[in-house]
Structures are given as C-alpha cells and as structure tokens.
Amino acid sequence: AAAPVITLDGPGGVGKGTLGRHLARRLGWHLLDSGAIYRATALAAVRAGLALDDVDGLASLARELPLRFVEAGDETEIWLGDERIDTAIRTPEVGQWASRIAALAPLRSALLQRQRDFQQAPGLVADGRDMGTVVFPDARLKIFLTASVEVRAARRLKQLMEQGSSASLATIAAEIAERDRRDRERSVAPLVAAPDARILDTSALSVAESSRVLEGWVVDAF
Ligand code: C5P
C-alpha cells in the first residue's frame, strides 16, 4: 500500500512549516515543504533572466531544476545545484515571485511529480496550499490552518528577525495580504480548504497548543 499522507494547507505565516516539522518529527515521517519548491523555482528563474510570465521557459526550468532537500539532523538543507539556498528563498521578494509563477498551470504540472515523489514509507507530512486538494487528494488526514493577517505578519516578522533580516510589520502584513489574495483568486489550484479537511484557527494558539490539537486528530485518523 502507498505510504500514508497528512496534508497541511493554509496561507503564508500560519504556522504550517513549524507545525509540519513538529508533526513529522513526532511521527518519524518525511516532510514536504512544497512552498520551498515554488520559491526555489522562482529564484532560479529570476537568476536565469526568465520573465515571470514566460510559461514555457518556467515549466522547462521547473522540470530540470537541480533541487535537493537534505535531511541533516534537526533541519532540512535546501540545495540548488551546489549552492545552499535556505535563506535566499525566504525573503518576501522571493515569496512574491513564487506566488506569481504559482498561478501558471503548466508550471504547477511540471512540479507535480516532484512533490508526489516525497510520498514514501513510513509516511509523509506535506505542507503547502493545494496538498489536500490537488497533490494528495487521497490523504488520510487533511488539515487546513487559518489565522488573522495581523497574527501571521507578527509571526513572520519574528522569523525574519531570528534569521538576522529586518522589515516593518506593516510591510510584511501588506505582502502577506497580497500573496493571500493572489493564491486564493487564481483559477488553478487556488488556496482553499478541501471539503474533507479539518480546520484549525491558530490565531490564539501557541505552537504547543496547536501541535496538541493536530496530534489528537492524527490519533483519530490512524
Ligand atoms: O508557503 P510559502 O510561503 O513558502 O509559499 C510560497 C508561495 O508558493 C505561495 O504564496 C504560493 O503562491 C506558492 N505555493 C503554491 N502551492 C503550494 C505551496 C506554495 O502555490 N503547494
């Protein structure tokens, strides 16, 4: 039988990355950070001088992208060829580029199999926007996270500061709101909860509290 999958979808800054990592570690499962794939593709495209609406160019770049996720102890290193790009892909600018190319259907198709290849024993926690709706529609447990824009912007700011970058809260909130709108309104694989997803609003919850809820759902589902 295929390895079990838990999908974790939701808008930017909602805690998918952190909660997904905790859950994957608790279960001893693999983790797919699908947003990092879109971000890496966007970064590579801009560096290659491709226009962000060059559908064919972007799709072939995506198919050939030498992207590797290397699990190293507590963290996952992200490599593009022989360069580590973990930090470079986390900027708000790359996030904007990613959400622009993510609206293109051929680009999304080109990345589909790369994402499905992460479904391996003993199991997979997959985080993104369309994990439960498009990439893993048969997942045993589908989770959709929400939180207010204000809360998400504050979390992002904290993350950026921990990485040594800075930005204003207002700038981050505006960036998140714009990316949300683009992700929700696109016609292909829009950001929306799967009909069979369980929904958790994390606005008022700590990471530990949210984790506890998710772990309860895992126990129910498996
Ligand atoms: O989650 P993250 O902020 O890293 O995602 C960056 C962008 O990539 C999102 O704003 C979205 O446009 C796109 N994305 C997507 N589908 C996914 C994951 C990310 O369209 N499964």
Image: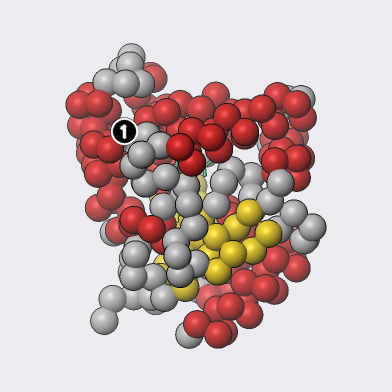
The residue that appears at 37% across and 30% down in the rendered structure is 101
Residue 201: x, y in percent? 68, 59
Against 174, is 189 above or below? below
Q: Percent position (x, y) of residue 189? A: 37, 46
Of 198 and 117, nearer the camera is 198
Question: In the image, is residue 60 above or below residue 190?
Answer: above
- Residue in front for this viewpoint, 76 or 40: 40
Let me know if residue 70 appears in the view. Answer: no
**In the drawing, does residue 72 fall left or right of residue 123?**
right
Q: Nearer the viewer, residue 135 or 19?
A: 135
For the N terminus, which image quadrant?
bottom left
x then y, percent, for residue 154? 76, 40
Question: In the shown orientation, is residue 38 left or right of residue 95?
Answer: left
**Residue appearing at x 62%, y 72% in the figure:** 214
Which corner quadrant of the image does residue 21 belong to? Answer: bottom right
> How many numbered circles are shown?
1
Report crowding for label 1: few under 14, some 14 to 19, many 20 or more residues within 10 A (C-alpha). many
| Residue at image mark 1 | 104
Q: Residue at x 75, y 68 (%)?
A: 209
Residue 16 to residue 186: above or below: below
Q: Secondary structure at mark 1?
A: loop
Identity of the amino acid at label 1?
Answer: Leu
